[in-house]
Structure formats: C-alpha cells, structure tokens
Image (cartoon, rainbow, N blue to C red):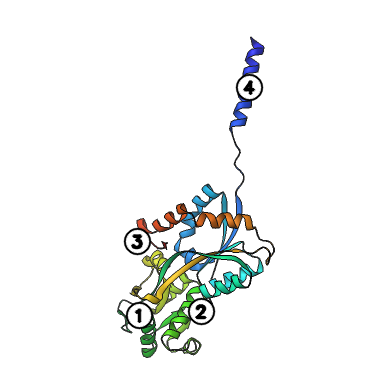
Amino acid sequence: MKRVLIFFLVCLIMLSGCSVEEKESPKTLRLTTTTSVNDSGLLEYLRPYILEEANINLEIVSLGSGAALEAGKRGDADVLLVHSPTAEKSFVDEGYGIKRSTFMYNFFVIVGPASDPAQIKNSSASEALKKIESVKSPFISRGDNSGTHSKEKSLWKLAGLDADVISKDTSFYVSAGSGMGATLIMASEKQAYTLTDLATYLSMKAQLSLDVIVSESPDLRNDYSIIVINPDKVSNVDVDTAKKFENWMLSERALDLIAEYGKETYGEALFFTE
C-alpha cells in the first residue's frame, strides 16, 4: 500500500510539472520615438498590454523625429515610431528601414493666448502664421529638426514666407531647441503662439495658460509611422522582436486600444486609427 501511494504521488508531481509551462522571459526592444508621442502618455498606456500580449519590454528613448532617424542609422534603436513623412520616406529609400507603416494620426494645432493678439482664429494654419509674422506676435518654435518643426517650416512655405529668414527674426520668433512639452511650457510662460500636436497639448492642458486657436485646417493632419530598422544596413538590430512589436501595434487589438486612449481622461481620443 505504501509503495502504491508513493507511486501515485510521483505521478501527480510529474503530471503537475508537465502541465505548467514556464513563460519565456520578455525580450527588450529599443524603441526610439518622438517627444510628442512620449509626452502624450500613449506608450506608458500601451506598455502593460505589450508586455502581457507580445512579451516585449520597451526601452524607450524620446527624441525629435530627425534625431530619432539618425539614431536608427547609427544602430541605437531596433524600431522607430516617428511623424516626419518626407524624412521617413528618404530613410526607407536609403535602405535604413525595412518599410514604413503608417498606422495612426492626430492633428497639429496652433495654440496661444486666449486673447489671440494676432487675430488668427478661423484662419487656415498658413494664413495664421502669416498674420503672426505681420504683427510680430511672439511665436515659439520647436527648432529641433523634429516632425513638428518640419511641419512648421512647411506651413511658413505655404504662407509664402521663407522659414530660414523667419527663424532669424528675433523680434517675434524664438527657437526653443526643445521637445514638445518644454516648448509648450515656454509658450505658456511667454504668452506666445506655437505649433503642437493636439495629443501633447491635451495631456498638458492643466499646466498651461494657452488655448487652441487654430485647429480645423486641412493642412494640419499629423501621421505617425512605425519603421523597423533594416539589419542588412545597420548592425546590432533585434529585427525579430522589432517585427513582433510592429505586428502587435498594427493589430486590431492595438488599434482599438489606441483609439480609446484619452477619452476617459480628456473627453476625446488623442489619436485616431484607420
């Protein structure tokens, strides 16, 4: 009887060991993204889902899009999440990225003092910049070669003005050389206008003395893309984990989560998906 009991216990232990699968340790992914995405809080919101469902732990570096693309060229990232379409296309065409997957968007807005000293409300974005320049109302630029800075320069061009000439006019124009959050704080302190993505503005609104002045302008759409770094061009890239992350971010599950982000806290979505 004793031998039968021992045999029974051994079988139970063996069956128990077979039924428990040890979960593989999470892979660490080097993600370089823009300050606007990071400041919005989106990635911290998604982080636990990515860890649980894709078994990936994010190591996040936040830079302007231009600096993020350069980091990708150096092999300092496995994957990028950026919003500077022209520069992204060149990056992929030059072989640094495998492909460019645009998966979400939001909108740039021009924010400024509630009094709207340049009277830009109801203008298009390019018309608003032209009015700001004509009356020399203070304007803070990111000035950091980011996607937002690139968008600002394209809007000056649409306004028929040379961005390089404008940037030297210190009578109203200040180049912050900073990320989106820091630029918004500076604009608030100086009661100046600035161009920002709506997500970062809404996430920081309580800290700022700025209103959205121009928003419904067709030239203000802001597309975000994922680019997996090409291991054939750049060394030290964990391409398998990067592709797994990309697949998760493009999945219906992730897109649904992104589309819900911000609704509970801010009363509206911060990003949109297609």
Label 1 – label 4 distance at C-alpha: 75 Å
The residue beneath circle 3 is: 268
* Residue 209 horizontal/vertical position (percent): 35, 72
Q: CA distance from mark 2 to mark 4?
A: 69 Å
Looking at the rendered structure, which numbered label has been put on residue 143? 2
Assess disc 2: are there few (<14), some (14-19) or many (≥20) residues with their C-alpha within 10 Å of its C-alpha.
many
Q: Name the amino acid, label 1.
A: Ser
Q: Is residue 99 above or below residue 113?
A: above
Identify residue for label 4: 11
Q: Earlier in the sequence, mark 4 or mark 3?
A: 4
* Contact between labelled residues 2 and 1, with CB atoms less than 8 Å apart: no
Residue 143 in view: yes
User: Which residue is depicted at the point 47% across and 82% down?
Assistant: 153
Instruction: Please tell me whether mark 3 sits on a helix, a strand or a loop.
Output: loop
Between 234 and 152, the one nearer to me in the picture = 234
In space, the residues marked 4 and 3 are separated at their CA atoms by 57 Å
Question: Marks 2 and 4: which is nearer the front?
Answer: 4
Circle 4 packing at 10 Å, graded few (<14), some (14-19), many (20+), is few
Q: Picture coordinates of residue 45 (x, y %)?
A: 46, 55
Tell me, yes or no, whether the two marked residues, 3 and 2, touch with CB atoms within 8 Å: no
Q: CA distance from mark 1 to mark 2?
A: 22 Å
Q: CA distance from mark 3 to mark 2?
A: 29 Å
Q: Which is more foreground, mark 3 or mark 1?
A: 1
Residue type for callout 4 = Cys
Comparing labels 3 and 2, the label whose residue is closer to the camera: 3
Q: Position of residue 22 (x, y in %)?
A: 61, 38
Image check: 118 left or right of 80?
A: left
Q: Which of pointers 1 and 2 lies earlier in the amino acid sequence?
A: 1
Dot 2 or dot 4, earlier in sequence = 4
